[in-house]
Amino acid sequence: MDCEQLAPLYEEYALGVLEGEDARGNRSAPGARVPALHSWNRESALGRRSARADVARSAASSLVKRQGPECGQIVRQLDRIRQSPASRAVFPVWAWAAAAALAILTGYSIRQMGNQTTQLAELRRQMKVATMQNKALQDQLEVGRQVASVMMSPDSMPLKLMPKDKNMPMVHAYLHPHMGVAITCEQMPAMPAARTLQLWSVPKNGKPMSVAIFHPDSQGQIVIVAPVNMPMNEIAMLAVTEEPAGGSPQPTAAIAWSAQVN
């Protein structure tokens, strides 16, 4: 390759991106004395002093445009500018400062995201608790509505389940032939978790049948409604016993509350 063919490659050679045969051709190209060498030296000096690699690119381009195919001295000067610190990729101070600021901002953002994630998890937990509380309230309201319907029905039979222990409160019951039986009570003492109260319908003939199991709430109140499991005219008595948690198929303890039906 002669100088005229190599001229378009001077810039790439100066920037260090020329590889293979093209680079070797540049180093071995014949040359002549360059008339504008002083101009080149000034531009290459500027390239060495500059902290930006694009000055080296500009100097190489300018020299190639001025000198055309006379490439001997050009190649040597391109070697200098290509190997000078200014022609390498220099990371300026402002870039280091920007990178440090970006690192700080990134760390702050990650920490904020962590805080937001924690806050979001806590908010979700609170929402879950609120949803559960709302459901429990809705269930209580529905039970209260059903109990009120049974109590106010003219077809209901009001009953008083008297306690065997005179220190215990009386239990009120309302027996309806279709809507079931509603039970209400206040000031009931707390019960251990391993024990439960169980309501039985005792037929005129046969064994008692379980109607419901229940616990007094934290205020000692009982409000339940349960379906009737036998015709109302066959029920001789309603009774309540204290049983193990989960209830029993048949009473295992003495009757604690009872009321005659028929």
Image: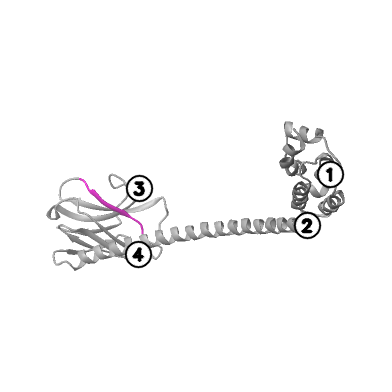
| Comes first in the chain, label 4 or label 2 | 2
Q: Are marks 3 and 1 in contact (CB under 8 Å)?
A: no
- Residue 221: which numbered mark, if any? 4
Residue 51 is left or right of residue 258, and the answer is right
Q: Is residue 205 above or below residue 178?
A: above
Quadrant in the picture for residue 133: bottom left
| Comes first in the chain, label 3 or label 2 | 2
Closer to the eye: label 1 or 4: 1
Q: Position of residue 204 (x, y in %)?
A: 15, 50
Q: Do the residues labelled 3 and 4 touch (CB within 8 Å)?
A: no
- What span is in magenta? 207-215
Closer to the eye: label 3 or 1: 1
Q: Nearer the viewer, residue 51 or 5?
A: 5
Instruction: Determine the CA span between mark 4 and mark 2.
Output: 76 Å
Residue at the spot x=38%, y=51% of the render? 195
Secondary structure character of the magenta stretch overall: strand
| Residue bearing the label numbered 1 | 77
Q: Assign a secondary structure to mark 2.
A: helix
Instruction: Determine the CA span between mark 3 and mark 2.
Output: 76 Å
Q: Assign a secondary structure to mark 4.
A: loop
- Residue 93: which numbered mark, if any? 2
Q: Assign a secondary structure to mark 1.
A: helix
| Residue bearing the label numbered 3 | 246
Closer to the eye: label 3 or 2: 2
The amino acid at mark 1 is: Gln
Using a 10 Å C-alpha cutoff, classify the residue at mark 2 as few (fewer than 14 neighbours), some (14 to 19) or many (20 or more): few
Q: Where is residue 111 in the image (x, y as percent from the top left)?
A: 63, 57
